[in-house]
Amino acid sequence: MKISIIGTGYVGLVTGVCLSSIGHNITCIDIDKTKINSLNQGKSPIYEPGLDKLILSCKLSNNLFFTTDFDTAVDTADLVFIAVGTPQSENGSTDLKYIESCIRGIAKAASHDMYVVIKSTVPVGTAQKMQEVFKEALQDEENKDLNIFISSNPEFLKEGSAIEDFMNPDRIVIGTNDDESLKRLKEVYKYFEKKNVPIFYTNVQSAQLIKYAANSFNAAKISFINSLASYCEKTGANIADVADGIGLDKRIGRSFLNAGIGYGGSCFPKDVESLKYEMNNSNSMLSAIIEENEKARFWPIKTLYDIFKNTEYPGEEGSYKFSSDDSLHIAILGLAFKPNTDDIRCSVGVKLAEELSKYYTVTIYDPIATDKAYVALKDCNVKAFYSINEAVAGADIVIFCTEWDEFKKLNKWELNTIAYIMRGNIIIDGRNIFDQKEMSKKFNYYCVGKQHI
Ligand code: UGA
């Protein structure tokens, strides 16, 4: 099938490459010439394990093309996927300006009825709104009396395991309100049907809500476990054991129950806020998820207050104040919002570096995202390094914000080296990476949801 995909971000690019790898003829469209040039040379503009290799092999099979020529690519496709960003507006709502501009572009380029699939995460009702945008845009085009049929096919891949998630999904959700779109989408996903992947068919509105509900539910699991963390710290219960214990109940499951410094990234924070907004801010469950996440993200600061025995304990994130002390050195390790990605959007590590550098000497290191973080922190007094040891040398406090394998795999000798080259001995582990008993032998070690030893 001939498919064009607008937008070469995580979702668009991975969708394009994976659909091409199963035999579809894919053209990925982006307005960013530098991105398209780099993709035409077989280089992915994002870090995602396995993606570069797959791009090259699909290009060799002559199944994958990258272009900035929107009009031709859109008009010659059997199906056009939209996978552009849907950022959050100031008030929590979803900003649909990029989707709208795609629809206007399609109206201009189309010479026949168009079948369009929205892959981006968009609120319920967006398809109807976009039908109207299309009609209105056609008024500027002479002699055009065309229809647009819009479907929803939300994407559930995770950054860092995007290809694996796309190729082996738990389910595929297809939301259509017309028969021809359904027929075309069935054709797109025939390969997965043969592999017995559950394909869930519904209407457009339900498909759109399924995406928000899935992200909010997983965010709720994280916030629920985090809501028990400080109680565990006080009582001597161990949050990891509690998660393991409840996770064995098949109705609950163990995934997304790792306590820590909360969820970040470009999806959970935005999607929970957006659903809350769409429901007129009246859903108290969604409000609680957000509130608990803010508390979790604040945990390293709260821990610093406890360590410094600061009496002016702040009540909420952002209202804290430390006494400036340039001689105190804090190293922050892990700036990506989670492992295996260089994405720093809504990253606790970056936020912490920004805040703490107002008071202290701050050094940073991330296995992949150091450069991106350094650019984001260009106005802050932060020193970036390309190895753990360089970043922690001379530090009084080390804060771990992301559970990268490189950190998890630090062996006894490497940890001894860290203990030796640090000036102080405080470790704040925001992702419960290490064994508490072992770490407490070498360091003054703080972790989430476990009583301090
Ligand atoms: C999330 C969803 O998991 C995907 O299914 C969805 O397609 C995607 O959003 C999207 O809407 O595009 P992603 O944001 O890439 O994927 O990352 P996750 O692995 O879900 O992690 C999200 C955040 O939750 C991270 O900050 C992670 O550190 C945190 N997390 C995750 C926890 O704090 N505890 C856990 O147990 C799991």
Image (spheres, helix red, strand yellow):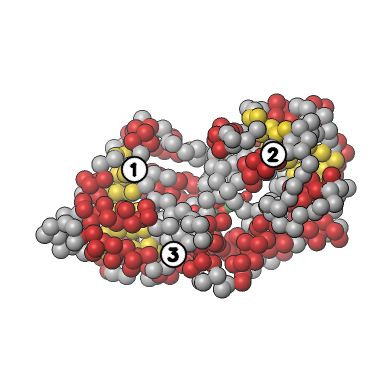
Q: Are marks 1 and 2 in contact (CB under 8 Å)?
A: no
Compare residues 35 and 98 and report the one nearer the observer: 98
Q: Separation of disc 2 and disc 3 at Cα?
A: 38 Å
Q: Separation of disc 1 and disc 3 at Cα?
A: 23 Å
Q: Is residue 440 left or right of residue 69?
A: right
Q: Are marks 1 and 3 in contact (CB under 8 Å)?
A: no
Q: Separation of disc 1 and disc 2 at Cα?
A: 39 Å
Q: Residue at x 33, y 48 (%)?
A: 6
Q: Position of residue 172 (x, y in %)?
A: 43, 60
Amino acid at the residue labelled 1? Asp
Amino acid at the residue labelled 2? Lys
Whichever of callouts 1 and 2 sits on the residue coming sooner in the sequence is 1
Q: Position of residue 120 (x, y in %)?
A: 41, 56
Q: Is residue 7 above or below residue 50?
A: below
Label 1 sits on a secondary structure element that is: loop
Q: Is residue 408 left or right of residue 48?
A: right
Compare residues 264 and 317 and report the one nearer the observer: 317
Q: Nearer the viewer, mark 2 or mark 3?
A: 2
Disc 2 residue: CB within 8 Å of ligand 1:
no
Q: Please give the label number shown on residue 123.
A: 3
Compare residues 183 and 69 and report the one nearer the observer: 69
Q: Position of residue 89 (x, y in %)?
A: 48, 57
Residue underneath mark 1:
30
Disc 2 residue crowd, few under 14, some 14–19, many 20+, Cα 10 Å: some
Residue underneath mark 2:
358
Q: Position of residue 35 (x, y in %)?
A: 38, 36
Compare residues 149 and 424 and report the one nearer the observer: 424
Whichever of callouts 1 and 3 sits on the residue coming sooner in the sequence is 1
Amino acid at the residue labelled 3? Pro
Disc 3 residue: CB within 8 Å of ligand 1:
no
